[in-house]
Image (spheres, rainbow, N blue to C red):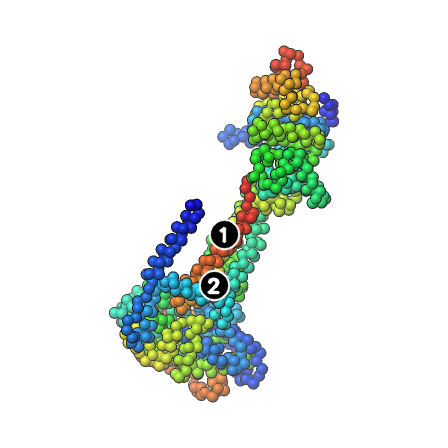
Amino acid sequence: MSDARNSKFVEVTGLTQRFPAPKDQGGTLTVYENVSFDIAKGEFVCIIGHSGCGKSTILSTLAGLNDPTEGGIIMNGKEIRGPSLERGIVFQNYSLLPWLSALNNVVFGVRARFPDWSKDEVRAHSEKFLSLVGLDAALDRKPSQLSGGMRQRVSIARAFATQPSLLLLDEPFGALDALTRGTIQDELLKIWSETRQTVFMITHDVDEAILLADRILLMSNSPNARVAEAVEIAIERPRRRAEIIDNPGYYTIRNYLVNFLHSEAKRPAQLVKTDGRPRAVNPLTLSPNRRAEPSRA
Amino acid sequence: MGTRVKSIGVSLLMLIVLLGAWELSSQPPAATEALTEYELLMGGAEQEARVPPPSAVALRAWEELSDPFYDKGPNDKGIGIQVAYSLARVLSGFFLAALIAIPVGFLIGMSPVMYGALNPYIQVLRPISPLAWMPLALFIIQDSNASAVFVIFICSIWPMLMNTAFGVAGVRKDWVNVARTHELSSLKTAFQVILPAAAPTILTGMRISIGIAWLVIVAAEMLVGGTGVGYYVWNEWNNLDLTSVIFSILVIGVIGMLLDLGLSAATRLVTYQE
Amino acid sequence: MSSILPMGAIKAAAQDAAGKLEKTKLSIGFVPITCATPIIMAKPLGFYERYGLDVDVIKTAGWAVARDKSLAGEYDASHMLTPMPLAMTMGAGSIAEPYLMPAVENINGQAIVLHNDHLDKRDPKDWKGFKFGVPFEYSMHNFLLRYYVAEHGLDPDVDIQIRVVPPPEMVANLRAGNLDGYLSPDPFNQRAVWEKIGFIHILTKDIWEGHPCCAFACPASMATETPNTYAALLKSIVDATQFSSNPENRSDIATAISPKNYLNQPEAVVRQVLTGRFADGLGNVLDVPDRIDFDPFPWHSMAVWILTQMKRWGYVEGDIDYRQIAEQVYVASDCAAAMKELGYEPPSETYKSYSIMGKTFDPARPEEYAKSFPIGKA
């Protein structure tokens, strides 16, 4: 794999999120604490964890839409304060503007990013990305006239068209059926292979994560969740959905991940190193008896 | 047979039955013999305060509508001219109100502080009947035309204001986040995201307002006179000419309906499906 | 109240009839009742034109609006009720603004109408609890009604209810039962008979023969700022008034003022009022040629009588200089000048005494008169 890990494009340090607890309980609720990890430039990172562990909150914080209780994030040498065009988001529920056609939704983003471009340039650029996600025929349709899958594709096209340095995807395929999901995963890989942006994606689907990611961050359960491990996916690219399951390392990695989610996720703070950083693991290089069990700190 | 065709059929049938009953019950008694002078001076057997039949109303409607723009002096003009004057006042007051209601509504919808600050005044002023404003307006403004426009303004501003505030405050946070993540300035966010998102609600407010405005202008003109459809009704009322009164009421109703249709078409233009 | 009107200047100005007219296009308001006959008919019968004026007579919805539009300047002059210029000058019921009444529009011309249900209640003593309509507080109608019922032993503020109703709505309210009767301007008295809803109980000329009713009024500023226009206008009004008083002209006038643009009433009704040959609603055809009459002279004694009644019923309080206000507002001298120019002989006095329902009014002793009534607040 790359040693792009050495160039820390995104540095997350000591991220903590606390909320005041419900009135009858008093005190504060800590969703996660002391989360620290890095993302290298051009890396595709997925994060997996059980519901409620705070993945979306971390993503919001990365996006600049949420202020952390403690800790901070540095991207490209600058601290993240508020949203920016350098961080594009594909929201879980698409967030397309319903009064604009598919094309105009993408145009919206492109115009915001490249205000000096002419109308024709903007249009051509937008059409290119919509075509990349296979929506040539649906340019003038409004979101209400598109299926869920198509809407998500428009959302992806919009995000990629603005060419942000960091792309944040919040369970983008969560609402789609398995068949559509498969098609879109391929399209995502296709676009990403051309643009090679840095990507941070939340997903519940282990297979999807293995297909897409260079590394997978594993989060423990809330409250007091941590990013426990950073699992390296040492499978060569280009990866194809139909073929990847034939890869010899596939099930090793998969079992490792599934085991973590089933048992280890429940364990508290022992899972991390004291500085909050996740343990780096490559399941393919673990000794056989340890492949079945994720190790402890 | 489609549902729509059936409804139209039933509706027409109801109309025919009602009009028929009305016509039959309103026939005046026939004069039998020559009238004495007393009877003549009393207006004959026929002359008695009664509701005119629809045939009389239809006849009057035909007379008035076939020459709607005549001008026989300041107190006697055709129905077309009267309606034009009233519409001019309504539209002036209405657009003036929109000019203020929509920006202020925006402000209130986007800022909880401003909402809290302005809300008490709105709640106190809103229930005041526009006709109660009339004497005050006449006193301060000293011009009956301008006072009528002011009364329209003060009564049509509230629905537009409240609906705009409501529409703006209710814009989905997701869409606002889209604007934020695209680094749109506040002004651009307002025009490119919030305005289109709130547009159906705003236009609904405008539709409510125009209905109220049309209602009020008739009453205001009856109070103050001049030229206008309310004055027309009042003038015919002076003469206890119920036929003309009914005709003018129907005209008022039709114009009101047309105004509503216009705004409802405009609302459909900006409506979107989520 | 100190006088701010330079009476000498006004008199001099009014007599300068040979001067050029400062303003020829005027708006004059009128309420569509037969009292305003001279003001109205002067338009179609060309009296304004004769004196070089281009006048629009504008129909007004009611007395309050007439007052407000006059005060606002939308009307250059207006048809008003004879008490109104006095009230407006004194600031009773509105802001104080000096007004002039150089001409009375009509004398007599009103009636008390009762609903047909009350055919058996001709004695006012039976009227306890009745609701009566009058067109305005500051009106001869109000004062005559009060005087009439008080003479029959009823207290108008206690035993009956007096409501202000615009004249056109009187008939409808009578029909609906909101009123038991009204003392209103014509043609709405005759109209109630025509609509077979009520009958004429008594003509006001039988309460006070020759009582003033409606007025032609204008702001005092008109006389001082545009004296030539003022003089021309006054002449046209006085001329029209004298023309109207001639019984031969009454029928033609009825035809001229009945259409939609003016009174908007059936011509037959207006004719009954103006000619005095009318059906009374009780089965009789009566002949009373001076049922309504037109005499422009604004007697100062009329003003004093009105002021005494305003004092009597509490519309004004405190000491009033009756003569001073009367002479300031009712510019009898201007009217006399106009009458002379037209070839009529004005009265030599401006005060005379009246006999109203058998009681004598002496204009020299107004305060005593105001206090002499058993029923009243003075």
The residue type indicated by label 1 comes to Ile
The residue type indicated by label 2 comes to Val
Within-10-Å neighbours for mark 1: few <14, some 14–19, many 20+? some
Q: CA distance from mark 1 to mark 2?
A: 20 Å
> Is A98 on the left-hand or right-hand side of A121?
left
Above or below residue C61? Residue C17 is below
Secondary structure type for disc 2? helix
Above or below residue C140? Residue A273 is above
> Mark 1 falls within which chain?
B
Quadrant in which residue B94 is drawn: bottom right
The x and y percentages for residue A138 are 61, 38
The residue positioned 43% from the left and 75% from the top of the image is C257
The x and y percentages for residue C288 are 33, 80
Q: Do the residues indicated by labels 1 and 2 lie within the same chain of the protein?
A: yes
Q: Nearer the viewer, mark 1 or mark 2?
A: 2
Question: Of C154 and B124, which appears nearest the observer?
Answer: B124
Q: Is residue C56 visible?
A: yes
Chain-order first, disc 1 or disc 2: 1
The residue that mark 1 highlights is B208
The residue positioned 52% from the left and 49% from the top of the image is B204
The residue that mark 2 highlights is B229
Quadrant in which residue A46 is drawn: top right
The residue positioned 71% from the left and 27% from the top of the image is A40
The x and y percentages for residue A186 are 64, 28
Residue at the farthest top position:
A289
